[in-house]
């Protein structure tokens, strides 16, 4: 959803280590100051989508709005960089509220690992042999065996990232959906994935896990040699992303469907 902000004043700047981002951060700090993140009204991230993703993870539970400015390579999640009128831009911005995925992965030793993802949770084969995966939705078997390089569960915010690269569907940011997308599927040949309600619980069981090991990855957190993975959207956590009017995330996701 999008809604106007309350008045924002104090800013915490975070930047990627690239010279371009560091130089921008120095200029902005000189002009606007730099408040500690725990006392700031808003977090401003300077870099590319990778830095923005790190910032969203770091401040996921802070409740503070996060505004990115493009000082890196890919800038899908970011606003245009401008030195002037930042406070005015922040107070004219709109919030897009997103929720992360929570991944609970059990490894071959029986240990449970819990991580969250903004974009997607992915399962990948670890060896030369294809993964064999069983898929359950809300405890009910929907696919007895998928033979593939892997599978992913993507949020609307992440649907234009890796999910799109493996021919998954683009999901409007406000749609209450998740994308379940196979990665290089071999069997069944005609299955191209599914759209699920965002309240669904997805369970992936790894068949022949000893012979065909699989890794599970929540954005950048990897668990090797998993035997089962549970994925669901964590509605208890709301992340507030800020975008300039007319350039919000839902508009960008819509534009992706027309090749912009």
Image: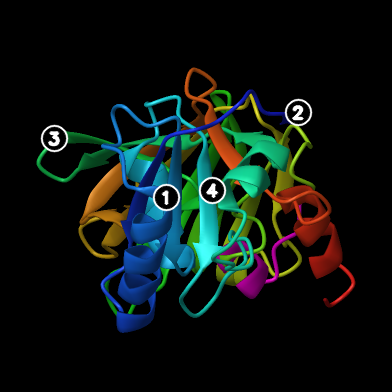
Residue at 66% x, 30% y is 198
Of mark 2 and mark 3, the one earlier in the sequence is 2
- The disc label shown at residue 182, or none: none
Q: Position of residue 196 (x, y in %)?
A: 71, 37
Which badge, 3 or 4, is on the more N-terminal residue?
4
The part of the chain drawn in magenta is 162-171
Q: Quadrant of the C terminus?
A: bottom right
Question: SS of the residue at dot 1?
Answer: helix
Q: Is residue 258 visible?
A: yes
Task: Please state if 111 lies on the left or on the right of 250 as rendered.
Answer: left
Q: Earlier in the sequence, mark 2 or mark 4?
A: 2
The mark closer to the camera, 3 or 4, is 4
Q: Which of the numbered marks, if any, corresponds to residue 3? A: 2
Disc 2 from disc 3: Cα separation: 42 Å
Eyeballing the image, is 242 above or below 251?
A: above
Q: Is residue 60 magenta?
A: no
**Distance between the alpha carbons at the discs numbered 2 and 1:** 25 Å
Q: Are marks 3 and 1 in contact (CB under 8 Å)?
A: no
Label 3 to label 1, Cα distance in Å?
A: 47 Å
The furthest residue to the top: 236
The disc label shown at residue 32, or none: 1
On screen, residue 71 versus residue 209, left or right, reads right
Rounded to the nearest whole Å, what is the CA distance between mark 1 and mark 4?
15 Å
Residue bearing mark 4: 67
Q: Nearer the viewer, residue 203 or 133?
A: 203
User: Residue 111 shows which numbered tag?
Assistant: 3
Query: What predominant SS class does the magenta segment belong to?
Result: loop
Q: Determine whether 212 is above or below 55 in the image.
A: below
Residue 240, given in percent of the width and then of the height, sits at: 56, 34
């Amino acid at each position: 959803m999008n809604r106007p902000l309350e008045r924002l004043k104090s800013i915490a700047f975070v930047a990627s280590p690239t010279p371009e981002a560091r130089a921008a951060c120095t200029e902005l700090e000189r002009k606007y100051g730099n408040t500690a993140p725990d006392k700031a009204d808003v977090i401003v991230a300077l870099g590319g989508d990778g830095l923005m993703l790190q910032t969203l993870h770091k401040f996921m539970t802070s409740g503070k709005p996060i505004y990115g400015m493009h000082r890196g390579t890919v800038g899908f999640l970011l606003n245009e960089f401008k030195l002037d009128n930042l406070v005015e831009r922040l107070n004219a911005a709109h919030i897009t509220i997103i929720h992360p995925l929570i991944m609970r992965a059990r490894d071959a030793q029986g240990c449970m690992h819990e991580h969250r993802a903004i974009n997607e949770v992915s399962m990948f084969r670890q060896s030369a042999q294809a993964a064999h995966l069983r898929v359950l939705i809300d405890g009910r078997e929907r696919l007895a065996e998928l033979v593939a390089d892997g599978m992913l569960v993507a949020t609307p915010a992440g649907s234009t990232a890796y999910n799109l690269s493996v021919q998954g569907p683009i999901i409007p940011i406000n749609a209450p959906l998740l994308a379940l997308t196979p990665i290089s599927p071999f069997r069944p040949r005609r299955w191209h994935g599914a759209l699920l309600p965002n309240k669904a619980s997805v369970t992936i069981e790894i068949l022949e896990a000893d012979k065909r090991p699989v890794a599970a990855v929540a954005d950048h957190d990897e668990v090797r040699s998993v035997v089962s993975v549970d994925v669901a959207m964590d509605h208890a956590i709301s992340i507030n992303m800020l975008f300039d009017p007319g350039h919000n995330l839902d508009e960008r996701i819509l534009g992706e469907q027309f090749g912009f």
